[in-house]
Image (cartoon, rainbow, N blue to C red):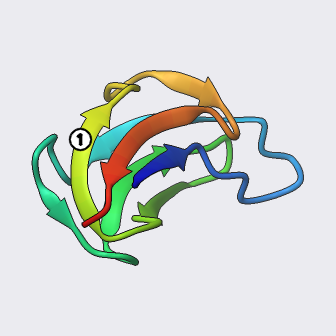
């Protein structure tokens, strides 16, 4: 099954976020809850957890790019 990784909404004032660093690469195995990506908001930089276990098959938003909340930023294919 394909699981969309989306830009989270961490607060009522958050409308977008910027990818600071991907902690995993395409092809890497990820576990549910494992730190996947660092995201910068207007107030802080936080790490986002993987929403599922599986293989990270695509990264749609590269480091340094900004996207609105709920934007599809990567895909994990589960086992």
Q: Residues within 10 Å of mark 1 (few under 14, many from 20)?
A: some
Write the residue at 59% across / 26% down: 67
Farthest left residue in view: 27
Write the residue at 59% across / 43% down: 7
Farthest right residue in view: 12
Query: Can you say whether 16 is above or below 43 in the image?
Result: above
Counting from the top left corner in percent of width and height, residue 45 is at 50, 54
Q: Quadrant of the N terminus?
A: bottom left
Query: Can you say whether 25 is above or below 34 in the image?
Result: above
Q: Which residue is mark 1?
A: 57
**Picture quadrant where residue 50 is located:** bottom left
Viewer-side residue, 57 vs 14: 57
Query: Can you say whether 5 is above or below 65 in the image?
Result: below
Viewer-side residue, 18 vs 57: 57
**Picture quadrant where residue 29 is located:** bottom left
Write the residue at 46% across / 61% down: 48
Viewer-side residue, 44 vs 79: 79
**Picture quadrant where residue 78 is located:** bottom left
Q: Tag 1's secondary structure?
A: strand
Counting from the top left corner in percent of width and height, residue 63 is at 32, 29
User: Is residue 10 at all visible to an observer of this figure?
Assistant: yes
């Amino acid at each position: 099954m394909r699981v969309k990784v989306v830009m989270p909404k961490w607060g009522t004032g958050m409308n977008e976020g910027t990818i600071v660093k991907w902690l995993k690469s395409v092809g890497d195995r990820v576990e549910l809850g494992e730190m996947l990506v660092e995201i910068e908001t207007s107030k802080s930089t936080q790490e986002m957890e993987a929403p599922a276990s599986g293989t990270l098959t695509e990264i749609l938003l590269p480091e340094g790019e900004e996207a609105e909340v709920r934007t599809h930023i990567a895909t994990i294919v589960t086992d």
